[in-house]
């Protein structure tokens, strides 16, 4: 299922619903004079708007383009408007019940609070979409292509709401190199640069910008499984935003659909993909596909590997949850060797990779051994299956 957005190209219905609900609640409280909340109406306006100011300020800090202008003009304008709303709310609470001054001040405070709430959402959306050159919304969400610039030059980045899914520099000298999650210090870089012999068959669950195609050599095959057709559109066709696929030295294939279902159908047809490396790269966002990270899924993955020397590389970089214990529980159940190559979350170069293989010698690459660590197995280590999974126990 894909489909296109009919009215909103971004997730505007959420803030609009919050604004409408807030307006109804504030106006209702301003009329219900016998309610204890009515006497605190002005301070409720201040609390609601202050919460929005904090959120918007936090988002502004994360946007190098928007933060300077926002901090010098918009933010202080919001502070002044908040003070005005508080003043009207406080003035109204001091007036005699039923007086016209109390009635008017209550509605002015409610109107200002609602307007500020809406403006906060608008600024947040503008900061998140700064530099957007393309945006698409379908059943799977909103995907944007953003243009940015750093010390190395200008680049394009694929973003799904607040999660980055890869980038590519626009300068010819850097356009063929993988960066970010796949840069030289990452676990996948260490693995693919040392996992011999060639030619290699690489499977990838999750296309992103197609960055992993930069690791291919003549004779290699890299096969992607991607559920979102818009993500494929941004990296393929006659004029793609990201050119990793078309610049690949090996053969690049893309299979549209749910990765697990696609792999199951291929297995049923006897089409074992014989992967030397299978990369699972679908867990960095807020909506984690749990059916791709459980015992039954890994049993399927093992059936598509070429031999015991093959490696499954799991990208588990995520702001909200630590998926390491889940992978460790599966590795223990399936008797797989495991090594985690982890770096604390950094703004410019975050990564967290876990490598698994039936043959521990496949992971005995000097760079991986030097950077790797184990994931402790305890009584609380989860084992996710199709019948059980629990994200709450993994929250950071």
Image (cartoon, helix red, strand yellow):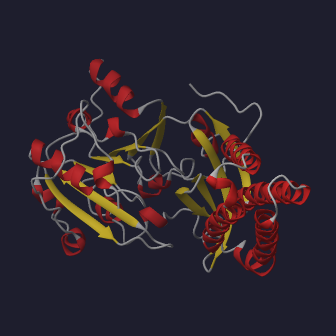
Residue positioned 69% across, 31% down in the render: 4
Quadrant in the rendering for residue 123: bottom right
Residue 110 versus residue 93 in the image, above or below: above
Residue 251 versus residue 396 in the image, above or below: above
In the image, residue 328 lies at what x, y percent?
18, 53
**Quarter occupied by the N terminus:** top right
Q: Is residue 138 left or right of residue 294?
A: right
Quadrant in the rendering for residue 55: bottom right
Q: Is residue 127 left or right of residue 272?
A: right
Residue positioned 50% across, 73% down in the render: 348
Residue 202 versus residue 77 in the image, above or below: above
**Quarter occupied by the C terminus:** bottom left
In the image, residue 25 lies at what x, y percent?
69, 46
Q: Is residue 221 left or right of residue 323?
A: right
The answer, for residue 247, to whether it is visible in the render is yes
In the image, residue 294 lies at what x, y percent?
25, 39
**Numbered disc total:** 0
State the residue lying farthest toward the right: 100
In the image, residue 290 lies at what x, y percent?
34, 39
State the residue lying farthest toward the front: 96
Which of these two is toward me, 298 or 375? 375
Q: Is residue 327 left or right of residue 110?
A: left
Which of these two is toward me, 331 or 102? 102
State the residue lying farthest toward the top: 269
Residue positioned 28% across, 24% down in the render: 267
The answer, for residue 129, to whether it is visible in the render is no
């Amino acid at each position: 299922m894909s489909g296109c957005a009919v009215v909103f190209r971004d997730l505007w219905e959420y803030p609009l619903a919050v604004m409408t609900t807030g307006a109804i609640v504030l106006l209702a409280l301003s009329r219900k004079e016998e309610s204890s909340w009515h006497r605190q109406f002005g301070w409720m306006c201040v609390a609601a708007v202050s919460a929005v100011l904090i959120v918007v300020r936090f988002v502004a800090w994360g946007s190098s383009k928007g933060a300077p202008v926002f901090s010098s003009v918009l933010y202080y304008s919001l502070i002044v408007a908040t003070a005005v709303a508080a003043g009207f709310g406080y003035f109204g609470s001091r007036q005699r019940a039923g007086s016209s001054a109390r009635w008017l001040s209550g509605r002015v405070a409610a109107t200002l609070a609602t307007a500020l709430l809406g403006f906060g959402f608008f600024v947040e959306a503008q900061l998140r979409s700064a530099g957007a050159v393309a945006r698409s919304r379908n059943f799977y969400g909103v995907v944007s292509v953003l243009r940015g610039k750093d010390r190395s030059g200008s680049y394009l980045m694929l973003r799904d709401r607040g999660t980055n899914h890869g980038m590519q520099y626009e300068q010819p000298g850097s356009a063929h190199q993988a960066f970010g999650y796949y840069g030289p210090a990452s676990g996948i870089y260490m693995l693919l640069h040392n996992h011999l012999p060639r030619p290699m068959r690489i499977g990838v669950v999750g296309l992103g910008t197609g960055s992993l195609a930069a690791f291919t050599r003549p004779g290699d095959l890299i096969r992607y499984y991607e559920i979102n057709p818009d993500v494929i559109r941004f990296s393929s066709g006659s004029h793609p935003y990201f050119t990793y696929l078309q610049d690949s030295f090996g053969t690049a294939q893309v299979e549209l659909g749910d990765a697990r279902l696609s792999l199951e159908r291929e297995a049923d047809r006897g089409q074992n993909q014989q992967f030397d490396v299978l990369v699972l790269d679908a867990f960095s966002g807020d909506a984690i596909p749990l059916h791709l990270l459980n015992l039954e899924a890994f049993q399927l993955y093992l059936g598509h590997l070429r031999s015991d020397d093959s490696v499954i590389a799991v990208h588990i970089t995520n702001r909200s949850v630590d998926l390491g214990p889940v992978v460790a529980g599966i590795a223990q159940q399936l008797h797989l060797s495991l090594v985690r190559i982890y770096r604390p979350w950094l703004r410019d170069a975050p990564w967290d990779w876990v490598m698994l293989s039936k043959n521990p010698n496949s992971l005995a690459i000097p760079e991986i051994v030097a950077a790797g660590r184990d994931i402790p197995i305890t009584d609380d280590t989860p084992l996710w299956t199709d019948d059980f999974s629990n994200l709450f126990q993994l929250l950071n």
